């Protein structure tokens, strides 16, 4: 089990990796947001990271996240990101509790999220998940389906379309990973004329965040390098 001290140390190391990678990348790119992926870890681990200055947290299971949100209700400025597979019976919970969704992959879910977003809350920030290596049985849409999903989503007032997310095939070598991240960046660049609110490339995890930042990631999703190996 990670201690608050190890979490703070790990966070500092990850921030240094991000800063170094961002410096090595082309200078015209903006800041990189660190999303701490706290799925499977208890609320105490989230609190330790929060105390070390972390504000954005990623969760993959809606029920599990709800329990943590209740325990951490005193942390008013925390931002919750849903990054897991989206099920229709969880959209109510996601729409009412989260600030971001990274894993949108079909119009029906977009419509439910928009309808269920409480009107007093700001629009839900949304990234569309792309199955960038066209892996069988993986979440996300293939690139050809993107224009249709963008069109269906951009007219929904409860949502704000922010970007694209991918999880490349972990079997790929460095060149393959880099090519996958570059492909996601090109998709975003080509989608911007149709959808000017797109500004987010959610790509890169504990083992490949440098490659993702080199290809223009604006947000990296990092779990095990902060909290330790999941069981
Ligand atoms: C678990 C998870 C991560 C974090 O992975 P690590 O390898 O632990 O950094 C990132 N993105 C998604 C979508 C995840 O499910």
Image: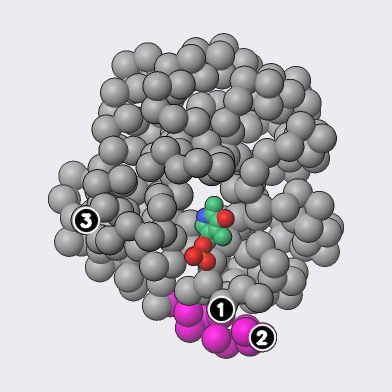
The magenta span reads 1-12
Q: Quadrant of residue 177?
A: bottom left
Residue identified by numbered label 3: 175
Pick the quarter of the image with the N terminus: bottom right
**Mark 1 Cα shell of 10 Å, populated few (<14), some (14-19), many (≥20):** some
Q: How many residues crowd around disc 2 within 10 Å: few (fewer than 14), some, or many (20 or more)?
A: few
Above/below status of 106 relative to 206 = above
User: Which residue does the image show at 82% across and 64% down from the upper left?
Assistant: 71
> Label for residue 1?
2
Residue occupying image coordinates x 46% and y 21%: 145
Q: Is residue 165 visible?
A: no
Disc on the earlier residue, 2 or 1 = 2
Disc 2 CB within 8 Å of nearest ligand 1 atom: no
Q: Residue at x 65, y 55 (%)?
A: 59
Residue designated by label 1:
228
**Where is the C terminus found, in terms of image quarters?**
bottom right
Of 134 and 50, the residue lying toward us: 134
Q: Is residue 4 left or right of residue 212?
A: right
Residue at mark 1 to residue at mark 3: CA–CA distance? 26 Å
Q: Which mark is residue 100?
A: none
What crowding class fits label 3: few (fewer than 14 Cα within 10 Å), some (14-19), or many (20 or more)?
few
Tell me whether the residue at label 2 lies in contact with that at label 1, contact meaning CB atoms closer than 8 angstroms: yes
Distance (Cα) linking label 2 and label 1:
8 Å
In the rendered structure, the answer to whether residue 40 lies left or right of residue 220 reads right
Magenta stretch contains residue 116: no
For marks 2 and 3, the one nearer the N-term is: 2
């Amino acid at each position: 089990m990670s201690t608050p001290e190890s979490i703070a140390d790990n966070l500092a190391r990850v921030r240094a990796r991000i800063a170094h990678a961002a410096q090595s990348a082309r200078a015209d790119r903006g800041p990189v947001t660190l999303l701490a992926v706290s799925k499977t870890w208890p609320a105490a681990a989230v609190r330790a990271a929060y105390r070390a200055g972390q504000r954005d947290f990623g969760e993959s299971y809606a029920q599990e996240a709800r329990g943590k949100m209740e325990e951490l209700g005193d942390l008013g400025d925390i931002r919750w990101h849903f990054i897991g597979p989206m099920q229709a019976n969880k959209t109510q919970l996601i729409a009412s509790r989260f600030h971001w969704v990274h894993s949108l992959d079909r119009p029906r879910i977009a419509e439910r999220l928009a309808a269920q977003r409480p009107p007093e809350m700001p629009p839900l920030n949304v990234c569309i998940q792309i199955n960038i290596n066209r892996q069988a049985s993986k979440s996300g849409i293939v690139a050809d389906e993107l224009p249709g999903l963008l069109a269906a989503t951009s007219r929904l007032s409860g949502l704000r379309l922010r970007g694209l997310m991918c999880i490349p095939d972990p079997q790929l070598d460095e060149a393959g990973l880099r090519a996958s991240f570059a492909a996601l960046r090109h998709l975003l660049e080509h989608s911007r004329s149709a959808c000017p609110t797109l500004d987010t490339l959610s790509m890169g995890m504990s083992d490949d965040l440098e490659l993702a930042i080199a290809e223009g990631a604006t947000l990296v999703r990092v779990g095990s390098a902060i909290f330790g190996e999941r069981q």
